[in-house]
Amino acid sequence: MIAATHTKTFIRCPHCDGDEFPVDHILNGTWKRSFGPWYCDTCGGSFRGTKDDVGQIDLELLDERKVQTLDLLVLQPQAKPVYFVLRGMRFEGPKFDGYPDNKEFFYEEHSCPTNWLRNIQTLIHDDDDDPHGLIEFVRSIESTPELLERDDMREAFPEAFSNDQKGGA
Ligand SMILES: [Zn+2]
């Protein structure tokens, strides 16, 4: 079958030419409108813009910056278990008939929690599915491409690797 395709319009970050920002929703319609501030994930720079009634976009560079951070949190030892509801998946169809859906292996051996904690739908603790304060903020540092490249969390957050429970309160 022939695939349906469509074209998207982007503007590039006016500071660094890095990030692309989709603007089809801005270009829709013939009325004037403004948008932003938008922040670039590559350079942190910001801008806002206006669109006139013939679809011309005019940008204004701003001084504000978005600084990406790494934020250390801690889940202190708990008297009661903490449950995680994750958004998962399984596959159906003739190709998968007879294959066991081995989620225990997937979660406990095959993959690191770092990979699937981003799929958390809900945390449940002590009969509470809205457990504010369960996970405590410790410290925030500026994230840099070099830091992410090195991926050395021992260097970035040494307190998280000591065994004397310094993290948190
Ligand atoms: Zn940029």
Image (cartoon, rainbow, N blue to C red):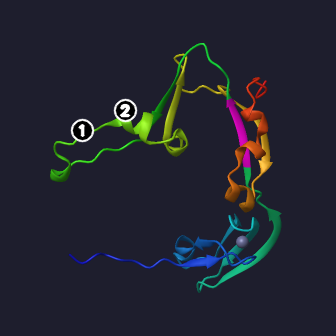
The image shows a total of numbered marks equal to 2
Residue at the image point whose x is 61% and y is 73% from the top? 20
Classify residue 129 as left or right of residue 67.
left
Q: Is residue 45 above or below residue 73?
A: below
| Mark 2: few/some/many CA within 10 Å (<14, 14-19, 20+) | few
Q: Position of residue 76 (x, y in %)?
A: 67, 23
Task: Identify the amino acid type marked 1.
Answer: Pro
Quarter of the rendering containing residue 153: top right
- Please give the range of residues in magenta: 70-74
Nearest the eye: 25 or 155: 155
Task: Identify the amino acid type marked 2.
Answer: Glu
Mark 2, secondary structure of its residue: helix
Residue at the image point whose x is 77% and y is 23% from the top? 164
Classify residue 122 as left or right of residue 142.
left
Quarter of the rendering containing residue 3: bottom left
Q: Which residue is mark 1?
A: 100
Q: Which residue is mark 2?
A: 104
Classify residue 132 as left or right of residue 167.
left
Mark 1, secondary structure of its residue: loop
In which quadrant is the C terminus drawn?
Answer: top right
Residue 151 colored in magenta in the image: no
Does mark 2's beta carbon lie closer than 8 Å to ligand 1? no
Residue at the image point whose x is 60% and y is 25% from the top? 131
